[in-house]
Image (cartoon, rainbow, N blue to C red):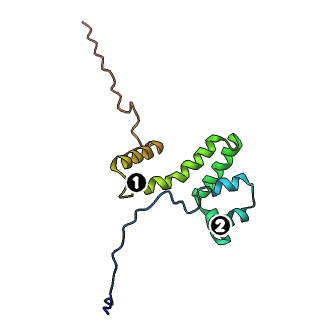
């Protein structure tokens, strides 16, 4: 039987960083803001222990998401728009996977990338290069 060499270095797969992974479940701030259950029960449902929850609470992205969820609930309640926002956040993961899949057609990838840039506000603004009309007046 053949043995592996002592210094075997398997090739590493290149896995791009997925910015949709926040370090906490995307719905956690919303569920905590809703306060329909205790923080312990909500964390248990996500498999988050006390130490992990303490780290999440220190995360500035989580703090902003929680504050935003509280404000949104005060303004809108549990409206259709808020539910759509929550779904959109979760669907970023699917978009990321489709864009990086070899099975996804290039046209679909391009549309997803354009849409993501548009929603993120990274598209060039229309009218950003407005030409100023030139007026010359000659008095004799």
Looking at the picture, does residue 4 appear above or below residue 77? below
Q: Position of residue 139 (x, y in %)?
A: 27, 8
Answer with left or right where residue 43 lies relative to residue 125: right
> In x, y percent, where is residue 28?
64, 58
Q: Please name the residue shown 47% across and 57% down the image.
A: 19
Q: Which mark is residue 99?
A: 1
Viewer-closest of 135 and 44: 44
Residue 39 or residue 104, whichever sits in front: 104
Tag 2 secondary structure: helix
Other residues around mark 1 within 10 Å, as few (<14) / some (14–19) / many (≥20): some
Residue 88: give x, y in percent of width and height: 54, 48
The residue depicted at 35 percent of the width and 32 percent of the height is 129
Upstream in the sequence, badge 1 or badge 2? 2
Q: Residues within 10 Å of mark 2 (few under 14, many from 20)?
A: some
Q: Which residue is mark 2?
A: 53
Q: Is residue 133 left or right of residue 87?
A: left
Furthest-top residue in view?
A: 140
In the picture as drawn, the residue positioned furthest to the bottom comes out as 1
């Amino acid at each position: 039987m053949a043995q592996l060499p002592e210094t075997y270095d398997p090739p590493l797969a290149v896995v791009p960083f997925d910015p949709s992974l926040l370090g906490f479940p995307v719905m956690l701030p919303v569920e905590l803001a809703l306060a329909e259950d205790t923080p312990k029960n909500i964390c248990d449902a996500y498999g988050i222990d006390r130490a992990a929850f303490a780290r999440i609470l220190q995360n500035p992205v989580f703090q902003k998401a929680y504050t935003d969820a509280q404000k949104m609930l005060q303004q809108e309640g549990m409206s259709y728009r808020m539910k759509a926002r929550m779904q959109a956040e979760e669907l970023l993961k699917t978009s990321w996977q489709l864009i990086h899949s070899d099975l996804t057609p290039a046209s679909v990838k391009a549309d997803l990338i354009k849409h993501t840039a548009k929603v993120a506000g990274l598209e060039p603004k229309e009218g950003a290069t407005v030409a100023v009309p030139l007026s010359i007046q000659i008095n004799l």
